[in-house]
Image (cartoon, helix red, strand yellow):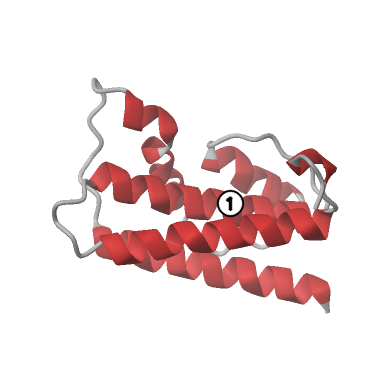
Amino acid sequence: MAGSLQELEPDELAALLARKAREDAVALREFAANAEIADTVLGFHAQQAIEKWLKAVLARHAVNFEYTHDLRHLIGLIEDARIDFPFDTPTVVRLTEYAVPLRYDELLDAVSLDRDVAVRLVGEVGGWANDVLDAFSE
């Protein structure tokens, strides 16, 4: 494997990002039932999983993207590349508020996270991303 993400081939980068997305999705699923784990932690893993799956799809299609947490921007790149994104964009974009800046800014208060919805959405986006990645490989 190369020394930095920028040096990876598109298929290598896509595989790495998809693997990292699955790790965040597993953390979300495992933590969701534990009331002692804050919504911000769960939202962070949900946001990260979706962000990484979007970037994996973009990488696999050789679409350049910025290393941003902005889900709206990443979805825009997906749509610009004429890749079908079958989800309600505002619902997905709402998870952006759980990205890294929120975790460090005590002044911000995120709206309560519906854990079941977050787990389901992450699973659906992951299934979609895996289907897109698999279809590209065929």
Question: Left or right of 90: which side holds 117?
Answer: left
Question: Left or right of 40: which side holds 3?
Answer: right
Task: Choose top left, top right, bottom left or bottom right for residue 27.
Answer: bottom left
Q: Residues within 10 Å of mark 1 (few under 14, many from 20)?
A: many
Question: Left or right of 20: which side holds 93?
Answer: left
Q: Is residue 87 visible?
A: no
Image point (22%, 30%), residue name: 109
Image point (82%, 54%), residue name: 10
Image point (72%, 58%), residue name: 14
Percent x, y of residue 65: 72, 39
Give the residue pinned by disc 1: 52
Question: Left or right of 4: which side holds 38?
Answer: left
| Front position in the image: 118 or 100 | 100
Percent x, y of residue 18: 62, 61
Q: On the rendered image, what quadrant is the C terminus found in?
A: bottom right
Vertical relation: 58 (above or below) 25: above
Residue that protrudes farthest toward the bottom in the picture: 138
| Front position in the image: 4 or 73 | 4
Q: Amino acid at mark 1?
A: Lys
Give the secondary structure at mark 1: helix
| Front position in the image: 47 or 90 | 47
Q: Is residue 117 visible?
A: yes
Percent x, y of residue 91: 40, 52
Q: How many marks?
A: 1
Percent x, y of residue 128: 58, 70
Image point (30%, 45%), residue name: 41
Task: Choose top left, top right, bottom left or bottom right for residue 111.
Answer: top left
Vertical relation: 101 (above or below) 13: above
